[in-house]
Image (tube, helix red, strand yellow):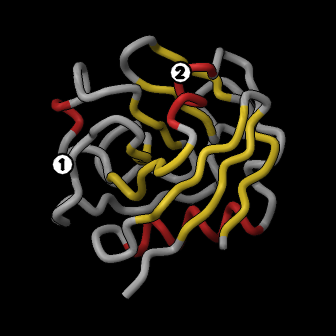
Amino acid sequence: MTNTTGEIHTSKGIMKVSFYDQDAPNTVANFVKLSKSGFYDGLSFHRVLADFVIQGGCPDGTGAGGPGYKINCELDGNNQYHDRGVLSMAHAGRNTGGSQFFICHSRNNTSHLDRNHTCFGKVTEGLEVIDAIQPGDKIEKIIIN
């Protein structure tokens, strides 16, 4: 079975993503639904921490917003490791994710996130874009293939 793929278009370039359909099916489905509806279009990366993560998906740009509902964490799959390029759901506690997600810069400072935040995909091309993103840079659109 092939994984869902997509592209995150930003002002700094395009990141191609392969999603973890087997490990996090509900999280992937939620991200795909929001992406296809245009929810992420024009939103910023509001949190950028060097050698850690870039985070986006907050509709109000503060890190406090979401889609108006919460989704459960999916932490039992084989790919629940926060390596370079991994997409993971941000949350304010277990089972409180919604639309905010982050992409890991590296493995150096992310091991404590394993099995606490749902990993749901990985950047397969355009890893250099992660390093180029600055606070306030925009998600132009997300295309799901």
Which residue is tagged 1? 115
At x 37%, y 15%, the residue is 51
For residue 143, side relative to residue 73 (left or right): right
Helix, strand or loop for disc 2: helix
* Distance between the alpha carbons at the discs numbered 2 and 1: 24 Å
Q: Residues within 10 Å of mark 1 (few under 14, many from 20)?
A: some
Label ID, residue 8: none
Q: Is residue 12 above or below residue 57?
A: above
In the image, 11: left or right of 115?
right
Measuring from the top left, give residue 75's x and y in whole percent: 21, 58
> Split into 4 quadrants, where in the image is the N terminus?
bottom left
Q: Name which quarter of the figure residue 65 lies in.
A: top right
| Coordinates of residue 69 in the picture (x, y in percent) | 57, 59
Along the line of sight, the residue nearer the viewer: 27 or 132? 132
- Tally of marks: 2
Name the residue: 17% across, 30% down: 112
Quadrant position of residue 32: bottom right
Q: Is residue 126 above or below residue 48?
A: below
Q: Position of residue 67 (x, y in %)?
A: 65, 53
Q: Is residue 38 above or below residue 59?
A: below
Residue type (three-letter) at the residue carrying disc 2: Asp
> According to the image, label 2 marks what residue?
131
Name the foreground residue: 33 vs 85: 85
Along the viewing direction, whichever of 50 and 63 lies nearer the viewer = 50
> In the image as oriented, which residue stretches furthest toward the bottom?
1
Q: Is residue 93 left or right of residue 35?
A: left
Residue kind at label 1, given as amino acid type: Arg
Q: Position of residue 110 (x, y in %)?
A: 25, 28
Give the label, 2 or 1, closer to the camera: 2
Q: Circle 2: is it few (<14), some (14-19), or many (20+) Cα within 10 Å? A: some
Residue drawn 63% across and 22% down? 133
Q: Residue at x 17, y 31 (%)?
A: 111
